[in-house]
Image (cartoon, grey):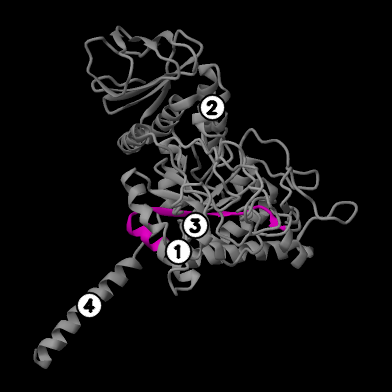
Amino acid sequence: MNLIKKLFVLTVVSFMFAQDAFSANMWINDLRKLFLTNGAIIYEINLRTFGAEDSNHNGIIDFDEAEESGNFLNAIQRLDELSQKGINTIHVLPITPVGKTKALGTAGSLYAASSFDTLNPQLASKHTALPIKTQALKFINEAHIRNIRVIIDLPSCGSYDLYLERPELFVKDKSGQPVIPADWTDVRLLNSGTETAVNKDVFNLYKGFVDMVLDLGADGIRADVATNKPAKFWKDLISYSRAKDPQFLWLAESSDSWTEGVSPYAVFTPYNKLLEAGFDGFYGSYFKLKDFKNGKELINLVANTKNITSKYNEPKAVIGSFTTHDEMSPILVNGVKLSQMIMWLDATLPVNSYFVDGFDTGDSYLYMWANKEAFKTFTDDDIYFVHRGKIDIFNFSRRPGGTLDKLAAEFAASNRIKNTFLPFINKGKYVTLKTTSPSVFAYGYGYEGKSVVVFGNLDFKNDIDAEIFVPKFNKDNSVIPVKIESIPIAQKNGFKINLKAGEIIVLLLNDTEIK
């Protein structure tokens, strides 16, 4: 090859590499816009387990047998899977280092932060010479390439290790001891100050966290127990982040049903003050679904959250917090039927969909070694501490996942349907529909001559005969079944049906617009 040809080839190759690099840096954050129009389909992941390789299938990662826990790099291999399931946003549980003293679990709780501006070394792959920051950057960039936004979790408290290092950051009780909030024995309560006097030291601690996640290219923050800080604390921090990225999302772990702090020594800022401070959204009380017996309870909850989110000058939104890492697996509560109901409620209610890793395949989060003495530990705790039926955030454990492939297929379908139904949810008229059974809920949307109708049975033990009244509907009108098991009988102004225990039905009325 002569010199000119060689130069030409090198130029083309260089251009291709430069183009790839340029494209990788072209991600434009749109998470706030997506979230505030109910379009986020969020999948919560614990990086320590998300890509874990448990080759001997004992549920624990045995490093001595060359098994690998989840980390930034092996998480990348699962991003295509999430994209195929319709996930467009991931909520990554804390990536900060964890405390090892007075710890819970053999790896330490993800929420026991020992630093707020560095990355958890547990999340670094040992199969590369790349520094951990580069690994984190690569993970987030690979998510963006697949059009998946990234929310990073901000812990509410500090570990005991951090208290020993910087005791001035923490609240002290009357005897001068650091305060243990609620029953979280592995953390201590940070002193964030008051509405009139924010603690600058703690504020700067959190400001360092914001700088770190912005530098990594993340798209938003979920603030753990956001009620523990004064509104002014959050307002100043949110304003700081928005000056750097106007589309940066702030999601508050807060609920309209929370009325008191986690300790008599803790600040308590209610959800409405958090929204006024700049948070884009909160949890609502959708986690109460498992306790509902009456269809009106769900309908009233939807009406309440719609009313809350409409009160502010700037748009606000909620997540469908039916299942989170703090909630027991739906499989244990009411079986597959509850999981199906949750995914279709997420797809059809005015909420951002929210799911935990393993939900879509029916993981019960039951670990055979749970709360037993450990063979090996990396903290001062020698017990495999686990909350029964909840995803493990305390140990180096297996990748979450069940065996219900049919549920996984329906999960992907419901996420696709949500995207189709967004114009109804955002632009249509939401209507509560009357039913003849107390345990049955029914609602719908009318938009551009069509309607989406949803009804379900909150009795997970008994089949129910019910009629659902749909104004202007005629039995000769076009009905397209979207999610159906039992066959509804069309009649004037609605349907008659025998709903199976825990069943949910979704219909598209092609030539009827309810108002």
In the rendered image, residue 393 lying in the magenta stretch gets the answer: no
Residue at the image point whose x is 54% and y is 27% from the top: 333
- Cα–Cα span, label 3 and label 1: 24 Å
Mark 3 sits on what residue? Answer: 69
- Cα–Cα span, label 2 and label 1: 38 Å
Query: Can you tell which mark lies on residue 217?
Result: 1
- The answer to whether the residues at label 4 and label 2 have Cβ atoms under 8 Å apart is no
Mark 4 sits on what residue? Answer: 15
Q: Nearer the viewer, mark 4 or mark 3?
A: 3
- 488 in relation to 237, above or below: above
CA neighbours of label 3 inside 10 A, class few (<14), some (14 to 19), many (20+): many
Q: Mark 1: which amino acid?
A: Gly
Indicate the quadrant containing the C terminus: top left, top right, bottom left or bottom right.
top left
Q: Mark 2: which amino acid?
A: Val
- Cα–Cα span, label 2 and label 3: 29 Å
Mark 2 sits on what residue? Answer: 333
Q: Position of residue 207 (x, y in %)?
A: 61, 64
CA neighbours of label 4 inside 10 A, class few (<14), some (14 to 19), many (20+): few
In the picture, measured across the screen, residue 24 lies left or right of residue 6, that is: right
Q: Nearer the viewer, mark 2 or mark 3?
A: 3
Quick one: label 4 or label 1, which is nearer the N terminus? 4
Residue 478, by quadrant, is: top left
